[in-house]
Image (cartoon, coloured by chain):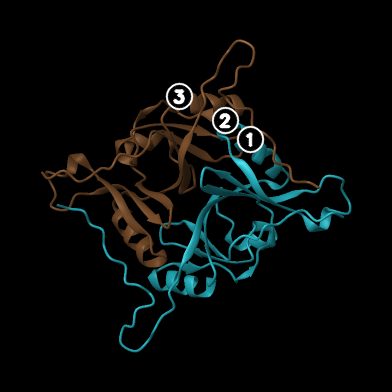
Chain colours: A cyan, B brown
Amino acid sequence: MATEVTDVPAAGETNGVAVEKTVTFTAVKPQLFVESPKVSDAVAFYKSAFGFEEVNRVTHPKRKADQELPLLLSAEIKLGSSSILVSDLSDDSTASGKPVGSGVIICLETEDIEAAINQAVKAGAVADGEISEGEGACCGRVGKVKDPYGVVWAICTPAKKCANVEA
Amino acid sequence: MATEVTDVPAAGETNGVAVEKTVTFTAVKPQLFVESPKVSDAVAFYKSAFGFEEVNRVTHPKRKADQELPLLLSAEIKLGSSSILVSDLSDDSTASGKPVGSGVIICLETEDIEAAINQAVKAGAVADGEISEGEGACCGRVGKVKDPYGVVWAICTPAKKCANVEA
């Protein structure tokens, strides 16, 4: 028998003196980055190619007044129970975590991003930039870590439902 | 109001003469590729860093007889209801879809991969290699498409539960 399901020590367990916080993730969402004006095109493509539905969108706040069509900064699309984020590569709020030569990172949603980042760094990940307000990426606050295998993970608070505000 | 949830034409609808098959996807799973001997390390890391649990694993069939510890070729790890695949970059079965400069692709599971690939190609994706048996990637059969934004999608039949066979 070789079913090696190793037990992960629960972060909230009392181990001697220090009681660590329990980190609970509520969602895992791949985030695809596309070039600046192409988020709308990409969302339309994923709808027709795979049948995704758009469930949330964030438009560029600065361009709302100047342009008739607000620039789409980020959208959440859903297929069955799985969500994917499609985001503008030039979105400043995610600049520090921009994947090098890659268009995909993984977002993990949690209420306590500091505890989650600490746990990942203790395990061997490297913090990538500061925690910032990630309005463009459909998260409240977001921090990034890079794992030892080159994958970037965004640790963020759950997505707000970002309805477009009428200008 | 700008809630642009565009309707996707159902692929199974009768449009004139041709009746296309309805494509149904049953799962969306990011697949992370890591260098050859490091799949076990990466799985251990994702368990301790984020609390993933291993739910499925495939070991290298050729090396089982030679080595005491079989080389882990691919594993499925789960966090809540979301699964991620961690796979050996040198796995031949996924060679055609190897991400260039990226460690992440997205797997979409469906029973009819031919119909799904056709639908994606009609929408503008480019087929990437032939459909093959993807035993190492925890799928039955797998085909790849590259979308216009550089993201590689693996279209595969649902993962088999691959229990380790005793040598």
Disc 3 residue crowd, few under 14, some 14–19, many 20+, Cα 10 Å: some
From what the image shows, is residue A15 above or below residue A101? Answer: below
User: Which residue occupies the extreme front position in the image?
Assistant: B14
Residue at which label 2 appears: B125
- The nearer-to-camera label among 1 and 2 is 1
Disc 1 residue crowd, few under 14, some 14–19, many 20+, Cα 10 Å: many
Residue B65 is situated, as x and y percent measured from the top left of the image, at: 11, 43
What residue is rendered at 54% in x and 70% in y?
Answer: A111
Callout 3: residue from which chain? B
Q: Quadrant of the C terminus of chain A?
A: bottom right
Callout 2: residue from which chain? B
- The nearer-to-camera label among 3 and 2 is 3
Residue B111 is situated, as x and y percent measured from the top left of the image, at: 41, 30
Residue at which label 1 appears: A45
From what the image shows, is residue A53 above or below residue B22? Answer: below
Disc number placed over residue B167 in the picture, else none: none
From what the image shows, is residue B20 above or below residue A160? Answer: above
Which type of secondary structure does the marked residue at label 2 adopt?
loop
Residue at which label 3 appears: B114
Q: Say if mark 1 contacts mark 2, CB within 8 Å.
A: yes
From what the image shows, is residue A22 above or below residue B66? Answer: below
